[in-house]
Amino acid sequence: INAEYMGTFKMAEGGVVANNHFKRKGAMRQAKVHQVKNHEFQAKFFKQPTFCSHCKEFMWGLGKQGYQCNVCQFVCHKKCHAFVNFSCTGASDIVESAVQRPHNFECHNYMSPTFCDQCGSLLYGIIKQGWQCKECKTNAHKRCIKNVPALCGHDQTERRGRINVDVTYQTLPNGQNVLNLLVNECKNLLPMDPNGLADPYVKIYIKPDPNKLSKLKTEVIRCSLNPVFKEQFKIELKVGDDAKRLSIAVWDWDRVGQNDFMGCTSFSIQEVKEAGLKGLHGWFKLLDEKTGDVYNVPIMEDSAVGNLAAQFEKGPTAAARPSSAASPSKPAA
């Protein structure tokens, strides 16, 4: 071992006592590596304006603004790195069951400033600044194309965070139909307050409901972007409600002024009914108000996406209605 330990000693009653202060000569401090799905994330200082490739928000700061993978150059916020749900493209042990849908890139002229969806930096130049996929419109530098995951058509971004819920349809002995809803938790929500946090709570509706008679809501969790609710609701259904949708929206509570919308998702009640006792459960993306009122987007691991895509490629018989992990309203994007 090429290291020298220099310790100092001092005399004391009863013998010699070693001083605990010592140092290793020539030692270098290594940056901490955060491993998530074979990614090797390290904190990094970005010299130019950079956007997070996970939530698409700007990476602010004067020091080390965010994390970057040492292998595939994927960039994200510190708060986002744990939620990246695809394997590193440069890793030696990529999950074999992951779906492989290569992008169809072509050189593209951009009429406005555009940032790379892989490394987050600006696509420089006057003409033909970068490459864009014809199908999913993913943008990338020429040098980043080899690192872009082959998941064309599958949106890996989470702009508003995610929510974990459990919904089941039940018919009581008296003939009353009810929805059992368990709101578990949310993660990686948008910061809405000046302190960089939020005061989230969840609103629940059966839509359309102009008079808001079906409105329910959870308690407010103060100063958190990862609130845990663990609240259960039993919603009684009326005649004709099977054609409606269950809307679950996250809002930010404000002491003064109106509360702020943060994101939502929704489920067709007929869809929940067809799922049976198993119901629908898991993580779902929070979408904007217009999109979230129409469908939901489940968050699946890359291996689950591959298995689901393989079922659909075998034909309509094998591609039966997906399990609770994937919403029948909109299979994995």
Image (tube, helix red, strand yellow):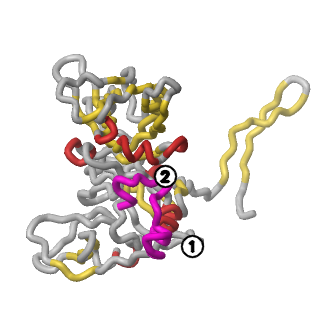
Residue 2: x %, y % from top left: 71, 64
Q: Secondary structure at mark 1?
A: loop
Residue at numbered disc 1 = 96
Q: Residues within 10 Å of mark 2 (few under 14, many from 20)?
A: some
Could you tell me the amino acid type at mark 2? Ala
Our reading of the magenta stretch's main secondary structure is loop
Q: Quadrant of the C terminus?
A: bottom left
Residue at numbered disc 2 = 325
- Quarter of the image where one finds residue 238: top left
Residue at 38% in and 59% down? 331
Residue 195: x %, y % from top left: 30, 29
Q: Secondary structure at mark 2?
A: loop
First in sequence, mark 2 or 1: give its number: 1
Residue furthest to the front in view is 174
Residue 240: x %, y % from top left: 29, 35
Q: Quadrant of the N terminus?
A: bottom right
Can residue 152 be seen in the rendering of this structure?
yes
Residue 210: x %, y % from top left: 17, 28
Q: Nearer the viewer, mark 2 or mark 1?
A: 2
